[in-house]
Image (cartoon, rainbow, N blue to C red):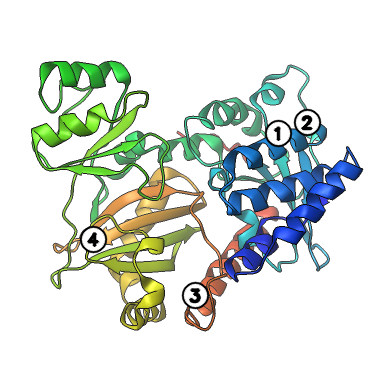
């Protein structure tokens, strides 16, 4: 099994502004010199994603996975536990960022790039995978990954080692499914999301009305939100204020399926929109970040946090007072949310409404979580992220000591 530099050290260098071009060239030269050096190809694929060269990155990854689908992640510390991460091929956001959660940890990490074919094989056996103390299904929910999760679910039901984040629970985080599990939780607003295929889209456009009869109840009014299926970070996200705008927006998705949901006005009394990222680990909430903006379509990277000392001060206060403030107000709702989905580790993007309810944008275990923001600008993030990493370590340590139980959930 080959050893990767891996995501964490490469991402840290990239975010620090380091010039990684020479490293990228060296990795390609390594792969050219040794046709079996799949680790060099995998690390090079990560660098190409940082540079926005998606097609090249995926080609390098495909070539690497033809050679080997199992990789040890480089570590400077002896391992007291061995974690096996089941991951999916694809972009960085396809999987839980285990390497960032375990940066500088004494928990060893091996990644297995899974396929549906191996899970469906009649002669499949757990012994075909690297030795491990516990297994973490790090695959995020998406159209691409759904067949993979479906295939692995029955294999992991009676796994000989503890399993964290079973596939069937991950599937519950789909945008058009999550509200079914969350909508009845007191203190939570999780609006329904409908998925429109091209047939439905063309029917809507032809009839000239904002929505036909869907599988269940339909939104009764606009504004409405449209986004391409499997999109992230606001890519392709559109708010439509009228029927004409809605039809025009639909026509802009000629070859895609889209998600449709009602727009919820989550503007605070001071006129700003605030988005919170919370991580739930083993029933406990932790602050990951908070961003504020005058724009409703807010993401941490477009909120101007690095340019505003005032915004950073507010985020620092949010993190410092999290246990006595946000977590105290919403602790019961967040704990119930995690239990409803059935994942030991999950990310939540949310907002606070003026009525005190928690408005859920998305639940997803594969959300970006790291401690690599510049310390000179964000010194307050280090202790907050340390709490997340310590809790994740404690979760793995506790689960590794348990007798495996069937991972199937209702």
Q: CA distance from mark 4 to mark 3?
A: 26 Å
Chain-order first, disc 1 or disc 3? 1
Query: Neighbour class for label 1 at 10 Å: few (<14), some, many (≥20)?
Result: some
Locate the N terminus and report the quarter of the image it occupies: top right
Query: Under tag 4, what secondary structure?
Result: loop
Task: Find disc 2 in the rendering and name its residue.
Answer: 66
Chain-order first, disc 2 or disc 3? 2
Q: Is residue 302 left or right of residue 2?
A: left
**Whole-percent x, y for residue 4 in the image:** 78, 53
Q: CA distance from mark 2 to mark 3?
A: 40 Å
Q: Residue at x 18, y 50 (%)?
A: 264
Nearer the observer, 112 or 337: 112
Q: Residue at x 31, y 82 (%)?
A: 310
Q: Is residue 208 left or right of residue 195?
A: left
Name the mark nearer the viewer: 4 or 3: 4
Q: CA distance from mark 2 to mark 1?
A: 6 Å
Name the mark nearer the viewer: 2 or 3: 2
Query: Under tag 1, what secondary structure?
Result: helix
Task: Find disc 1 in the rendering and name its residue.
Answer: 62
Determine if residue 404 is in view. Answer: no
**Whole-percent x, y for residue 73 in the image:** 76, 54
Q: CA distance from mark 4 to mark 1?
A: 39 Å
Query: Under tag 3, what secondary structure?
Result: helix
Task: Find disc 4 in the rendering and name its residue.
Answer: 295
**Whole-percent x, y for residue 291 in the image:** 34, 67
Task: Find disc 3 in the rendering and name its residue.
Answer: 384
Q: Are marks 2 and 4 in contact (CB under 8 Å)?
A: no
Q: Is residue 100 left or right of residue 293?
A: right
Q: CA distance from mark 2 to mark 4?
A: 45 Å
Relative to 158, does residue 10 appear above or below in the rendering? below
Q: Are marks 1 and 3 in contact (CB under 8 Å)?
A: no
């Amino acid at each position: 099994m080959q050893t990767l530099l891996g995501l964490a050290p490469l991402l840290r260098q990239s975010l620090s502004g380091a010039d990684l071009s020479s490293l990228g060239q060296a990795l390609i030269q390594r792969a050219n010199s040794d046709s079996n050096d799949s680790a060099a190809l995998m690390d090079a694929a990560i660098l190409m994603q940082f540079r926005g060269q998606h097609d090249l990155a995926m080609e390098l990854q495909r070539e690497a996975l033809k050679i080997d689908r199992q990789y040890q992640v480089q570590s400077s510390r002896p391992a007291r536990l061995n974690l096996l991460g089941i991951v999916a091929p694809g972009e960085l956001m396809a999987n839980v960022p285990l390497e960032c959660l375990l940066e500088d940890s004494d928990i060893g990490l091996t990644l297995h790039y899974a396929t549906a074919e191996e899970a469906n094989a009649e002669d499949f056996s757990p012994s075909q995978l690297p030795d491990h103390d516990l297994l973490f299904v790090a695959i995020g929910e998406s159209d691409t990954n759904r067949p993979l999760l479906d295939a692995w679910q029955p294999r992991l039901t009676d796994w000989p080692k503890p399993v964290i984040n079973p596939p069937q629970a991950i599937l519950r985080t789909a945008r058009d499914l999550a509200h079914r599990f969350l909508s009845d939780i007191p203190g939570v607003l999780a609006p329904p999301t409908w998925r429109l295929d091209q047939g439905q889209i063309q029917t809507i456009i032809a009839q000239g009305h904002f929505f036909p009869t869907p599988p269940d109840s339909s939104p009764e009014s606009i504004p409405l939100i449209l986004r391409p299926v499997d999109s992230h970070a606001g890519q392709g996200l559109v708010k439509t204020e009228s029927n004409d705008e809605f039809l025009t927006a639909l026509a802009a998705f000629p070859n895609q399926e889209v998600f449709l949901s009602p727009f919820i006005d989550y503007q605070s009394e001071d006129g700003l929109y605030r988005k919170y990222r919370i991580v739930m680990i083993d029933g406990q909430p932790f602050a990951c970040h908070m961003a504020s903006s005058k724009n409703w379509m807010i993401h941490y990277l477009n909120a101007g946090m690095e340019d505003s000392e005032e915004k950073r001060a507010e985020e620092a206060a949010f993190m410092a007072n999290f246990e006595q403030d946000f977590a105290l107000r919403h602790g019961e709702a967040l704990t119930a949310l995690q239990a409803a989905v059935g994942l030991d580790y999950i990310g939540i993007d949310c907002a606070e409404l003026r009525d005190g309810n928690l408005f859920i944008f998305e639940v997803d275990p594969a959300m970006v979580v790291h401690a690599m923001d510049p310390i000179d600008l964000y010194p307050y993030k280090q202790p907050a992220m340390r709490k997340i990493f310590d809790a994740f370590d404690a979760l793995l340590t506790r689960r590794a000591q348990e007798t495996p139980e069937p991972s199937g959930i209702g």
